[in-house]
Image (cartoon, rainbow, N blue to C red):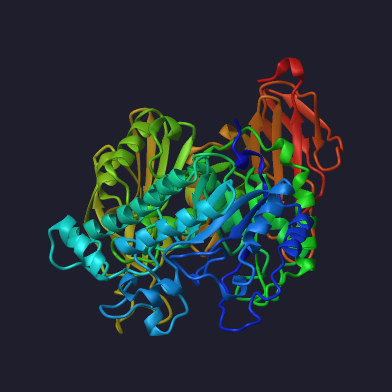
Amino acid sequence: MKQWYETSYRRNLVDMHIEDWDDTFLSKFSPEDYFENLKRAHTQSAMLYLQSHVGYCYYPTAVGKMHRAFEGRPDAMRRLVDLCHAGGMDVIGYYSLIFNTWAEREHPTWRMLETDTQSRYEQGRRFGLCCPNNREYVSFVKAQLREIADYFPPLEGMFYDMTYWPVMCRCPACRKRWTEESGEAEMPTVPNWSSDIWKRYYRMRCRWIAEFAREITDYTKQVMPGITVEHNYANSVAGDLSVCSTEAVADACDYIGGDLYGELRAHSFSAKYFRAVTKHLPFEHMVCRVEGDLSRHTVSKSQNRLDAEILLIAAHHGASLVIDAMDPVGTLDERVYRRIGRAMEREMLYEPYFRGKMLTDVGVLYATTGKYNPIGENFDSKSCSLAVSAILSAEHIPYGVVPRGTPTERLAEYACIAAGGIAGLDDADRDAIEAYVRGGGAFLFNGIGEPALLSRLLGAEVTEVPPHRFTYLSPTSDSPLWGEFNADYPIPMPYRQPTVRAAEDCEVLARLTLPYTVPGERRFASIHSNPPGVRTESPAILSRRLGKGRVIWTALPLELSESAAVRACFVRLLRELLPITAQQVLAPDAPRAAELVTFRDGEGISISVLDLDAGDEARTLPAFDLSVACPVCPKRVFRIADGTPVAFAWQGGRVTLRTLPTDLFAMYRIEFRKDENT
């Protein structure tokens, strides 16, 4: 039996984080008007607020407080649930974990302490925060979930918001648990990645939040049999290391989703990551209808921008959930839902083709536990992964995102894996990577966040980190790899660079060169700059054959350079490991803004083209040639939106075609002959 989410691609959420100190707040809430707007937006699944960050409930509660506007009509939200069900829509209940202002006010012993004595709310912030290590708070949450199960008709799903650490909590419950589990009297408060105690503390916080997520998931399924559970996983990408939103939280979810803001290239990365880490497809990608974020309540995204975000998700075969926010009085703007509806009408054309396996040549290894730099430099797994992804997209190299915990057999699906700024791995990850390389894989990584991996793959160790915050990588040959750079005019990078020793069978492609003086000193060689002056023997770029595979390591993340010439060196190093002839999809003359996402199934191949530079005004990308690996001669090629046929040639196991000019988005279908399905 199919689960509801398997065929649900158009979803909606209306934020209702609304206070009740004013009699007009939510006074105009109408289940009927709400439902009509959902229909205008072509909604398949509605996420409805049962409670909010404020803490007030939208149902009769004995253990909490119902919003005052609902006291005279306590069944208003249940009425909306019934309307949705009668209209053929799935209903997912929204519940805010941790963020509960009413609960902190009423039960101050539950609060998260940001300092030794004060919570954020006590320091003047709007949000009250309750600690998941406080067992009384957990019991309160379970009591409310039991109330929800008893009051509402069976729901299709529950969504839990804010399952992460918004502060490094110092409350008594956290201190007690730390001491009991660590044996240490004092809980650390200042990040220090050279400290084993700090590393233990970080791992514990990750485990604590994951165990809380699992406990809530298990209890939900106990009191609401058959229901699906999702925890907001946005902070796995959007948050920093302190939030502890890792794959262990994802494991408590039936499918992955989260609300993400920002530009389209970041959305492209998160869509690929969500697709890789979710237990079940489709993943869910939440987009906000407001320009920027929800703080700009009255400014909606343009039609073109909203279309772009939703169609990007469609290119990855994901489910789009559009977030709106209710006016404090309880009304919604009908114009917003007509705009969402127009976007969904474009998306609906492609839903029948949301199937198959995404074609990828490069895997971008991203560690949610690696969002730090062990020596304090300004790059980590997150920043490097985003940068690598943007480069791969611009170069039209098919890629996916590889989460931590990916076994060797899954790694082997990629011809090459790029792991910029990698840190935070465990022995199982390292074992899988080494086995992948020895089995014939190619691995490109940088930095010193993983000393154990350096040792395993390169026989290398860090000996020193000189204080120079501007350094150079000097090529050891005149290879075309380096473009305009050479030993006299080396590759500049604005970071400290380690000195290392490596195994004798490593090939040194570049060495560390330092400026004449330490940048920042009054003494200088050239007053405006820090030119290269002190050559060293320390390797800066290493290559090594290991088993059947190959490894390339760079001391610093070339992908993060502001210089196109330096980033081009990164691309050429990648090409050393992944020759262009090995790519499954080729589009050498495509605009750099064109994102290509390709899926193959038993009946054909679907290729999406999206303008990643799409803004408020519509524009057209020019036509370009592309070819894709195809095992059989196709029956036909056409543009899905309108059925326009596209001329093609098939030779040497590849289909070559020329796209039509693209107005924001297009999806092409290469249709196999029925007797040649593969």
Q: Position of residue 337 (x, y in %)?
A: 76, 62
Q: Is residue 483 visible?
A: no
Q: Position of residue 31 (x, y in %)?
A: 71, 63
Q: Position of residue 514 (x, y in %)?
A: 32, 65
- Quarter placement of the N terminus: top right
Measuring 71% from the left and 70% from the top, which residue is drawn there?
Answer: 300
Q: Nearer the viewer, residue 567 or 58?
A: 58
Instruction: Name the side, left or right, on which 87 lies relative to 250.
Output: right
Q: Position of residue 538 (x, y in %)?
A: 27, 54
User: Seen from this angle, which residue lies furthest top?
Assistant: 675
Instruction: Name the side, left or right, on which 156 lies relative to 404.
Output: right
Q: Nearer the viewer, residue 671 or 446?
A: 671
Instruction: Name the side, left or right, on which 94 lies relative to 446.
Output: right
Determine the image quadrant of residue 107: bottom left
Q: Nearer the viewer, residue 128 or 464?
A: 128
Measuring 41% from the left and 60% from the top, which residue is drawn there?
Answer: 141
**Relative to residue 177, is residue 87 depicted above or below?**
above
